[in-house]
Image (cartoon, rainbow, N blue to C red):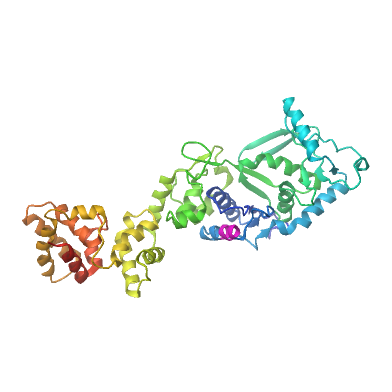
Amino acid sequence: MGATEKADGTQRIVTRFAPSPTGFLHIGGARTALFNWLYARHHGGEFKLRIEDTDRARSTDEAIAKILDGMRWLGLDWDGDEVNQFARADRHAEVAHALLDQGKAYRCYATPEELAEMREQQRAAKQPIRYDSRWRDRDPSEAPEGAPFVIRLKTPLDGETVIDDAVQGKVTVRNSEIDDFVMLRGDGTPTYMLAVAVDDHDMGVTHVIRGDDHLNNAFRQRALIDAMGWPQPVYAHVPLIHGPDGTKLSKRHGALGVEAYRDEMGMLPEAVFNYLLRLGWGHGDDEIISREQAIEWFDLDGVGKSAARFDLKKLTNLNGHYIRESENARLATIAEPKIAAEIGRELTVEEQDLLQRSMESIKPRAKSTGELAESAGFLFRTRPLNLDEKAEMLLQDDAPARLAALVPHLEALPDWTEEALDTAVREFAEARDLKLGKVAQPLRAALTGSATSPGIFDVLLLLGREESLARIADQAG
């Protein structure tokens, strides 16, 4: 691991995404991954993946698998193998001890009780709660023999630290506000602050693009990086995503795992990709942006400084656009397992072909892959159909008699084509001084068991003459 150079000798841009596998890949993390991926791809650099699995109690293999699956579904491929942070604990400890040997860090023997008392005194005095460096200049020999200790970094006492953030602009913090933070715990395990700084350096990361909730961490990590004499990365802290009401994004707003958008909400990856891209980044008035355009256009100067607001309705509408643009075969493949689960069996080859043909008339109205499956489900139900409540209402009163009268007109058709069917049904309605809906709606209910479906003539064509007439007969009185 380490920084790489391009053929012309200039430094190659390297970004990274570093999720904690204590849960699934949530939507905010997916956007962070997307921005890092796009920045690297736009500049011909590398995008790396690091699993920050140091929280052993909460990190799970299932969560890691879900994160990788979500990344692949969105098409966010990473360069090289993913790095597991926990496996690098010895390297993290090595850096902490190197700083200790150089006099840039020290052993702190303060007990938990002493630290609790210190914080209580600071609260009482209405002072900022931070470590008071009580062991910074003391001789370790003053500690009881064999006493446990942590290793803390000696942060600068005077002056200020300035970070020229690529999104937030110039941010300044007085060094007196940065305490001597713990790098290595009493059990020898590294803290997040140490592990992140070491891993970013060793992986050659040149640009750290992450949520602005990490901005304070950047000043601590910068102090550690300076102490080691390493080059500083460029920081870009992106505003977080809020709900439509301006509050922190939560599950009720849509802060779910990426797999929920795919499996439960029926989103296509390109729709989620496009929507996340536009959450906090813009390119003029462009809303529909392809993957190729995103790579060509993306840069950090397009990232806004204010929080983006998550709008599920916009995402759903965008998903409808991509469904309409998708190939029928692909949509049928996505819808097929849902239909098979509903009818309790696998589709035959002939039924798979029928499902694919049905997509042309179904997809214009669908905004989710679930709607595709729901709208096509009528094709594979067995007779007699179970009618939903609205369909039953459409088949009350004289509707069955109307259907019975229509059957001979349909049976007499020499060709089962859209034009012939359209003409026959309209002439039937006009001859009885009925609006078309008075015939089409009961017909729809009889053919599909529902009050909603693709266009009625599309339904008749998809079902075919024999099945259509049989279903109509089942409901005719």
Count of all numbered marks drawn on residues in the image: 0
- 286 and 393: which one is in front? 393
Q: Position of residue 117 (x, y in %)?
A: 78, 33
- 56 relative position to 249: left or right: right
Q: Position of residue 317 (x, y in %)?
A: 39, 49
Q: Position of residue 409 (x, y in %)?
A: 10, 65
- 239 relative position to 224: left or right: left
Residue, x 9% and y 62% (percent of image)? Answer: 405
Residue, x 84% and y 51% (percent of image)? Answer: 97
Which quadrant of the figure contains the C terminus? bottom left
67 magenta-colored: yes
Q: Position of residue 257 (x, y in %)?
A: 52, 52
Residue, x 63% and y 44% (percent of image)? Answer: 236
432 magenta-colored: no
Magenta stretch: give its range: 62-68
Image height of 119 relative to 436, above or below = above
